[in-house]
Amino acid sequence: MKSYSLTHLQELESEAIYVLREVASQFENPALLFSGGKDSIIVAHIARKAFFPGKIPFPLVHVDTGHNFFETIEFRDKYIKDIGANLIVGSVQQSIDEGKVVEEKGFNASRNSLQTVTLLETIEDHKFDCAMGGARRDEEKARAKERFFSHRDDFGQWDPKNQRPELWNIFNGLKNMGEHFRVFPISNWTEMDVWQYILHEKIDIPSIYLAHERDIFVRDGVIMSSCDFIEQRETEPTFRKKVRFRTIGDATCTGAVESDADSIEKIIEEVAAARTTERGTRSDDKRSEAAMEDRKKAGYF
Amino acid sequence: MDTNSYLDMELLRFSTAGSVDDGKSTLIGRLLYDSKSIFQDQYEAIEESSKRKGDETVNLALLTDGLRAEREQGITIDVAYRYFATPKRKFIIADTPGHIQYTRNMVTGSSTSNLSIILVDARHGVVEQTCRHTFISSLLGIPHVVFCINKMDLVDYSEEVFDKIKTDLEAFSSKLNVKDIHFVPMSALNGDNVVNKSENMNWYQGSTLMYLLENIHIGSDYNHIDCRFPVQYVIRPKSEKYPDYRGYAGRIAGGVFKPGDEVAVLPSGFTSKIKTIDVMGGSLEEAYAPMSVALTLEDDIDVSRGDMIVRENNQPTVEQDIDVMICWLNDKKMVSRGKYAIKHTSNDVRCIIKEVKYKINVNNLHRIEDDKEVTMNDIARIAVRTTKPLLYDKYSRNRTTGSLILIDEATNETVGAGMII
């Protein structure tokens, strides 16, 4: 008898398509958070597949800290144009200018935590009732218990002890006025799955994921990009090294790894042999053992 | 691991249930550690925590306790999902707590699993908790169950102890609907028969747990006989290139669909033929569960979300009076004669609870007929009447078209998990 089975990537893709179609059906005004990082690119790619030959029936939203790698923004703008999607930008700089948040000062200053305010404002301004993102459960232990459909109260807060049970593939997106949902279509993907999928589907990604020569300096054992947004100490000299980024966040808190992996195939080999998690280069997670859980409760992505 | 072999891997979802001291977290830690799925920074973090707590060895259990409250109390209160891969398969673990007050978490974790791992402490044998976990696995229709007889090191790796427990479990399981059962004697702490074969139990000729996880046949776990396609979303581009395209998007819940198949659309009953099965980049010759596709039909008939496309000669039950095994998930008890919203496949209906027929004592499977109050973690057989007919199969026949959730209309919370009988 013929065996009807799917590979694990096909099954994960099918699950993500299913989730995206549920969002389009259950919510009136959803949006897809799009940072130009690989995980949000994957979700956008799967969204194209889910509604083909129609267009993606919701806008893409970028919460812009103003401290970006320029390669990411260049990629973002080209990508949006190519797929004919609608992009909305929420600006952290604007939140700072309007006095809604206060910028951190000093050597380790980062706008990462300020994103939360801008994100919640953008959601409110545009009356989005659902914000989708590319977060994965394998990234961090607080995310291991996140639902596909994650309910947020009218302050945008997440209550990990009072989550709605999620059974089978039946998603409950019902809510009261003012509340919204975060939805994570690629919850069940790992870093390895993401790279394999990028290779298999020939998906374009920003060039800084691949090994390249860059001016860097080292802080607390993490390789940081030398750039205008970060104040370097005198004891932190600039080098030129061949590096790549495993994740792309705000430039002030995303570290690089030394690497010769200048193709997707080589990245996959590198990921398979890696001895640290991908967020190991993120200084924002290292602030305390429960750093991610605390930020998520406050409404961080 | 080379690129091509990775693309050929299957996905196995399994659940584990256990309480604080039966070694479940240690077992998962062991699976992750011995399959080299733990990263150096994770290992260093738990090494550091273990030292701080004064543990002599690195406590692998710390890997699985995610939330702060759990780390503080040393318990697992929610379902946590873990991921690892071997060259053969990718695994998703739904890790759930085992105490009776967390029955609902077990039900949640089991709902998407192909396989369930049930830990038995070799010193204590079959206890209430073992029966409860086995019953829930059976109730949720998990096709494969692996009993791990753990802590064999504490009973001198005795074959007699293992055989006695195995006999007891076989007797209990025969009362249940579990298709495929395995028994593995092990010590998760020392790694005996988890990934590597034990040198302390030469009398055991069977497989290690990892071998079972990598090789159990899961290709037949989906129903490939009864064609069921719940319509989730209608794709209508109305673009220059596709002015008249109408694609019915959904995830196949059962059977095999091919272009040319004669189909009926329920509940209207109109018939047509499948014209194409579309995905981005082309059309398919056939599609089966759990693929997400878009169907187009030969005839222009009215189809919308909540409808179901099936084969003309093999249709689901269409009924308003339905018997359901329900697991209650909320701390507000079920209101008898109460009204609730139902989500079933892509359908939203309302229902009234007509009757609680009996509750089940999950520790010994006895029916409770004198107490019909359904509170959190209870499992009960109830009768409901829906506002419009559901298109369903029995849960034992199809886990997608046979499952539903009950929602409290005042709070919007998911309060019940139902399996249609």
Image (tube, grey):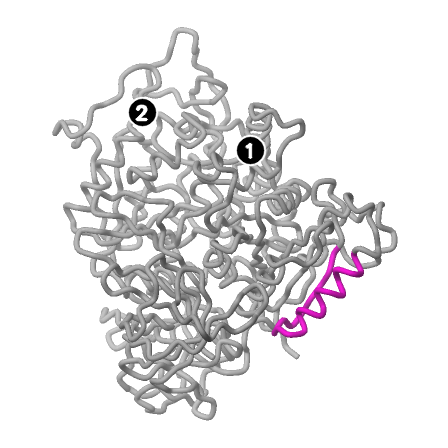
Q: Amino acid at mark 2?
A: Ser
Image mark for residue A110: 2
In the image, residue A10 lies at what x, y percent?
51, 61
Does the magenta-highlighted stretch encompass residue B315?
A: no
- Residue A35 seen anywhere in this rendered image of the structure: yes
Q: Amino acid at mark 1?
A: Gln
* Residue A57 visible at all: no
What kind of element bears circle 1?
A: helix
First to last magenta residue range: B162-184
Foreground: A107 or B117?
B117
Q: Residue at x 31, y 65 (%)?
A: B407
Q: Residue furthest right?
A: B202
Q: Which residue is mark 1?
A: B42
- Dot 2 falls on which chain? A
Front position in the image: A37 or A95: A95
Q: How much space separates mark 2 and mark 1, taking CA atoms?
A: 24 Å
Above-or-below relation of A285 to B2: above
Location of residue B141 by image quarter: bottom right
Where does residue B56 sit, x and y in percent of width and height?
A: 67, 27
For marks 2 and 1, give the one nearer the viewer: 1
* Rendering coords of residue B2 (x, y %): 64, 48
